[in-house]
Amino acid sequence: MTPVHEFWLHRSGDQIGDLEVSIRTGNVDTPLTTYTGPLQNGWEDSWERQSLDISAFAGSTVQLVFRCNKGVNGKTSIDHVAVFDK
């Protein structure tokens, strides 16, 4: 079994800010991935499921951290956040 962090993501718009996904243990944030630029062309486009391997943190108490830098024009939406064994 591999622990995974899964969520649905929608990012669209010109000059959208970056989204950094990290995992926090104690006072330390470890970046898992960074999304730069849009994933979709507009709000009518389908959301995308994201799945990140967090097996390095198995057995630890963690917090999931989403940091989004504000862009000039764009929107980031996150839904259905889950952590489970796959």
Image (cartoon, rainbow, N blue to C red):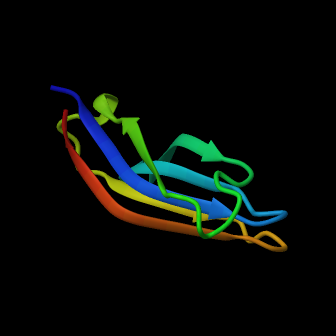
Q: Residue 86: x percent and y percent?
A: 19, 32
* Towards the viewer: 36 or 49: 49
- Left or right? Give the position of 10 relative to 26: right
Rendering quarter of residue 51: top left
Q: Position of residue 24 (x, y in %)?
A: 41, 51
Which residue is at the front of the view, 5 or 24? 5
Where is residue 55 shown, x and y percent of the image? 29, 29
- Residue 41 percent across, percent down from the top left: 71, 58
Foreground residue among 26 and 75: 75
User: Is residue 11 left or right of 85 when viewed as pictured?
Assistant: right
* Residue 25 appears in view: no
Q: Is residue 40 above or below residue 32?
A: below
Which quarter of the figure has residue 54?
Answer: top left
Q: Residue at x 42, y 56 (%)?
A: 8
Q: Looking at the picture, does residue 7 appear above or below residue 77?
A: above
Q: Residue at x 84, y 63 (%)?
A: 15
- Of 25 and 45, the residue lying toward us: 45
Q: Does residue 46 appear anywhere in the picture?
A: yes
Residue appearing at x 49%, y 49% in the figure: 22
How many numbered marks are there?
Answer: 0
Q: Residue 76 lies in what quarter of the image? A: bottom right
Q: Is residue 61 left or right of residue 21?
A: left
* Quadrant into which the N terminus falls: top left
Residue drawn at 79 percent across, 69 percent down: 71
